[in-house]
Image: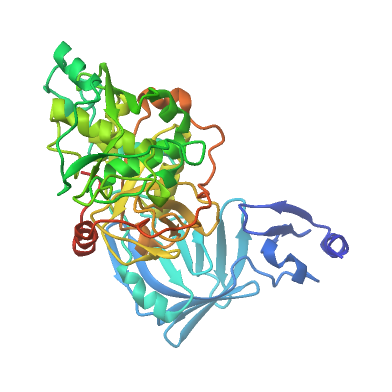
């Protein structure tokens, strides 16, 4: 039936079919005009005429932007596409146009039906089911108009924020020039934070290699308790092995989850099970020199011997617990941070990779398409991406945003989701495991900041053909979501905190 329909279209219009940016099936008529049909609706196509148009329906103007100047509207101005006609409504006044589409060029032109001197030519910068962004082709200032499907959506659009310091671009070099918070150092490969720090002595190396030497307790926890360790519950390191409990080191844990997502073999390369309930971890000192840290199977617990460090599902002591403890022991010697509570991403990742040349983007520094591009570009280069939100309570899939907290960026497996950000709480069902599905909604994206870290020593171990994260199956047990009350209260009450700095 499908072949018959498409064959009929070809005979009727002597046309050729091409696919353009997943917008639909483009039919070029004998006269050179185009008609475009969403591929999801191709079963509904029986005939094609010049009255089938590229953009359909009513679109209400939310706001107009020219450089730094913005004008907001209440949804009483709109454009209506009907066949090959466009009607521009200003209240009760209407200006009719005839439309020609140039999909390969990304724009359409319209000439006044009554007044031939009136004409417009607009690029289609964005077209989703809910929003249409049009930019004037011939205007040197790139005037943009933002249209929405309903007057209500248009009137609410003023809460959207866009960067004011640059025009939207797909040039990655332009975006890299916009980065901020650079931590590269001319003194040490570990980054600025590690400059002029303690230099490793032979005594330091001996202390770090002795598993009997335990770090100081922290986060209100009381003691070190021997626990059974299962380094890899799912055979290989996975983000589900990283679940926060009592220590406020969300940046560290989001980083460990990123290690598992991008570099599971690197984790196995730097972590050695000594076979005697001790574990040696390859790390780097503040000067970027290799140093080994050996820890026991004693895990930091509360007075009741409940584990306060991060664990895997069902409170399993995993590789993540061991690397977290190794970082705590490292700090006991070098004291680059008071403890690992509140440690920044750029202070934690270099401990294992030896590379502190990081940078970031604050919230609203990039357009939606630019942030998606930067995340995907970073993954292609094997870089870790950790970020957060400056607004709480935004639903992203079945989970919501919290502030003062760090998340692991991951690829999306849906066209409706820009990317995924995993909460190191590991909350939600086993199908979620803390994954927030970030929608293509500007009011959500404008709240996101991120820090990007190079792979350093991990580079040779990058996972081939990186895919979206599918959490492993597990049965939730009591205490799985054992996030300390004070941490939950902190992130719920804090606002406007960027992971960037």
Q: Residue furthest top?
A: 202
> How many numbered dots are placed on residues in this image?
0
Q: Left or right of 283: which side holds 28?
A: right
Considering depth in this image, is 224 or 483 the residue closer to the camera?
Answer: 224
In the rendered image, residue 460, in percent from the top left (x then y), is placed at: 46, 23
Image quarter (top left, top right, bottom left or bottom right) of the N terminus: bottom right
* Residue at figure coordinates x 42%, y 50% from the top left: 313
Residue 431 to residue 181: above or below: below
278 versus 500 height, above or below: above
* Along the viewing direction, whichever of 96 and 364 lies nearer the viewer: 364
**Residue 260: x and y, percent?**
43, 38
Which picture quadrant has residue 482?
Answer: bottom left
Q: How did the renderer colour the structure?
A: rainbow
**Residue 40 seen in the current view:** yes
Residue 84 in which image quadrant = bottom right
Residue lying at the far bottom of the rendered structure = 92
- Residue 80: give x, y in percent of width and height: 54, 77
Question: Which residue is found at the position 74% from the left and 65% from the top?
Answer: 42
Indicate whether 290 appears above or below 320.
above
**On the rendered structure, is 114 left or right of 1?**
left
* Horizontal and vertical percent position of residue 239: 43, 44
Can residue 175 be seen here? The reply is: no
Q: Quadrant of the C terminus?
A: top left
| Residue ID at (19%, 64%) | 493
**Residue that appears at 40% across and 61% down:** 144
Closer-to-camera residue (89/47):
47
């Amino acid at each position: 039936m499908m072949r018959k329909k498409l064959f009929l279209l070809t005979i009727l219009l002597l046309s050729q079919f091409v696919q353009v940016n997943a917008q639909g099936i483009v039919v070029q008529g004998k006269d050179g005009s185009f008609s475009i049909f969403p591929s999801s609706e191709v079963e509904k196509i029986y005939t094609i005429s010049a009255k089938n148009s590229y953009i359909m329906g009513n679109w209400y103007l939310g706001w107009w932007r020219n450089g730094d100047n913005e004008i907001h509207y209440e949804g009483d101005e709109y454009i209506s596409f009907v066949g090959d006609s466009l009607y521009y409504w200003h209240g009760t006044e209407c200006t009719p146009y005839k439309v020609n589409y140039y999909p390969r060029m990304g724009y359409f032109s319209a000439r006044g039906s009554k007044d031939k001197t009136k004409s417009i030519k607009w690029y289609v910068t964005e077209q989703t089911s809910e929003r249409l962004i049009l930019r004037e082709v011939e205007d040197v200032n790139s005037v943009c108009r933002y249209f929405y499907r309903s007057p209500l959506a248009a009137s609410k659009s003023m809460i959207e924020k866009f960067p004011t310091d640059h025009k939207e671009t797909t040039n990655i070099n332009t975006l890299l020039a916009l980065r901020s918070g650079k931590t590269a150092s001319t003194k040490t490969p570990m980054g600025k934070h590690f400059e002029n720090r303690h230099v490793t002595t032979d005594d330091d190396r001996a202390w770090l290699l002795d598993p009997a030497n335990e770090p100081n307790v922290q986060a209100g926890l009381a003691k070190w308790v021997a626990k059974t360790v299962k380094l890899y519950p799912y055979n290989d390191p996975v983000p589900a092995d990283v679940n926060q409990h009592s220590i406020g080191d969300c940046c560290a844990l989001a980083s460990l989850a990123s290690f598992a997502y991008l570099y599971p073999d690197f984790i196995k390369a730097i972590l050695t099970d000594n076979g005697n309930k001790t574990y040696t971890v390859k790390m780097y000192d503040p000067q970027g020199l290799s140093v080994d840290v050996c820890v026991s199977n004693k895990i930091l617990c509360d007075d009741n011997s409940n584990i306060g460090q991060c664990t895997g599902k069902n409170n399993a002591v995993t590789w993540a617990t061991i690397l977290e403890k190794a970082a705590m022991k490292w700090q006991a010697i070098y004291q680059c941070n008071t403890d690992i509570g509140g440690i920044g991403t750029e202070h934690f990742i270099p401990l294992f990779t030896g590379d502190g040349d990081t940078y970031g983007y604050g919230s609203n520094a990039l357009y939606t398409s630019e942030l998606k591009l930067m995340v995907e570009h970073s993954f292609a280069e094997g870089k870790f991406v950790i970020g957060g939100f400056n607004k709480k309570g935004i639903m992203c899939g079945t989970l919501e945003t919290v502030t003062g907290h760090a998340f692991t960026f991951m690829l999306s497996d849906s066209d409706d989701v820009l990317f995924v950000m995993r909460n190191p709480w590991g909350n939600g069902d086993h199908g979620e495991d803390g994954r927030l599905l970030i929608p293509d909604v500007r009011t959500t994206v404008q709240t996101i900041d991120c820090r990007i870290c190079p792979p350093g020593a991990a580079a040779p171990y990058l996972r081939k053909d990186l895919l979206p994260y599918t959490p492993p199956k597990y049965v939730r047990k009591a205490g799985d979501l054992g996030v300390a009350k004070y941490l939950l209260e902190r992130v719920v009450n804090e606002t406007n905190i960027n992971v960037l700095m």
